[in-house]
Structures are given as C-alpha cells and as structure tokens.
Amino acid sequence: QRQMCIRDRVVKMAGIELEELDAIAVAAGPGSFTGLRIGSSTAKGMALALKKPILSIPTLEGLAYRLTPVTDELVCPLMDARRNQVYTGIYSFENNGLSIYLDSSAMDIMELIPKLQEIDKPVIFTGDGIPVFRDIIDKELKTPHEYGRAGFNRQRASSVALLGAELYKAGKTEKAEEHLPEYLRMSLSLIHIS
C-alpha cells in the first residue's frame, strides 16, 4: 500500500500516467555500488512492468550536461572514486549536442591532468570530487580552469531525463532485461585476492 501511495504522488506530480511514458531513463553509473544497484533495479522493475525500454545515461554525461548548454569551455566532471582516483570524462557542447572528448573513465587524478593539457582549452570542473582534488588541479594543471558553483556539482534527474529524450529520439534504447549498471571498476568487496 505504501508503494502505491508513493506511485500515486509521483504520477500526480508529473501530471501523466506511468503507462504514457515512452521509456525509463536511469543514471547508469559510475557511482556508489549500492546506489547504482538500487537505481538500476528500480528502473528495470518499472520498465519490465510497463513493457518499456530503458535509456542508460552515463552519470558523468548527466553531470556535464548541466553546464554544457551554458558554457563554451570544456566540462570535466569529477566524482571521487577513492584511492586517489576519479570517475571522469571530458565534454563540450557543440552543434547543439554533447560532444565527448574523453568517455566515462576511472583513473588517477594525475592521469587526467595531461589529457586536459593536451586538448588545451579552458576547463570548468563540476562534481563532488572538486573539494578532494582541487589543490592538486590548481598546482598541476596549466590550462585555464575554474570550478562550477556548488548547485551545479550534483546529479539532477532533469539532466538524466533531457539526455534520455535525446537518446530516445536517436533510437538508442535497451531492453529492460539487458540493462546493467556501469561500475567502471570492481568493488573491493567483489575482488577476491588469492
């Protein structure tokens, strides 16, 4: 009964019935392992029940999309992946769409710096990794750079939905049965050391 109440509230807020949806967009990763499993399971369950396809949106593209329509700089989302690593990518807004210079990756922060310098364009950083890696970036990165305002440093469902609409128009859906989250690296709890 509680689930029906939440469902009814969501439907009322959206102003449409769930059956009217064309597809279910989900931030597919990277991110916390538990969060990705919960989000993907929820999207998969809804898509299966409604017989709708899934639109897997890379989390980093969702973060970048919040800034790309309003800046001509490169956008580099940083998510703290622990152990001096970041989940990152490099994006820009070109020809009314998101252009990818570096696809979603897990890497040491010191691997990212030369990639940005090689492109040699001003960069704006966004994401929860800024406080963790700002000192290193300021010390090592010679390319002009700045940091997104705090309100732009978190994922938003609206960005996932807008990117989902673009993927849907392009016919880039997946069957609910085939959807899996994108971890980019294995959890330490999943790695067996012999």
Image: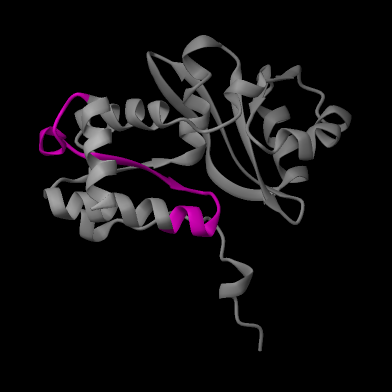
Q: Is residue 34 magenta?
A: yes
Picture residue at 49% right of the left edge, 53% below the top: 35
Q: Position of residue 169 (x, y in %)?
A: 20, 28
- In the image, residue 157 above or below residue 174: above
Q: Is residue 100 above or below residue 123?
A: below
Q: Residue at x 41, y 56 (%)?
A: 38
Give the image quarter of residue 82.
Answer: bottom right
Give x and y (percent) for residue 64.
52, 27
Q: Nearer the viewer, residue 119 or 163?
A: 163
Residue 107 shown left or right of residue 131 in the figure: left
Q: How many marks?
A: 0
Q: Is residue 5 left or right of residue 116?
A: left
Quarter of the C terminus within the rendering:
bottom right
In x, y percent, where is residue 191? 59, 76
Residue 56 position by quadrant: top left
Q: Is residue 86 left or right of residue 186?
A: right
Residue 47 magenta-drawn? no
Residue 41 appears left or right of 102: left
Return the residue nearer the eye: 117 or 80. Answer: 80
* Residue 45 picture quarter: bottom left
Depth check: give the residue in front, 62 or 12: 12
Q: Position of residue 122 (x, y in %)?
A: 68, 16
Name the outermost residue toward the right.
139
Residue nearest the observer in this picture, 63 or 140 = 63
Residue pushed farthest front? 1
> What residue is at 15 percent from the left and 53 percent from the top?
49
The boundaries of the magenta stretch are: 15-37
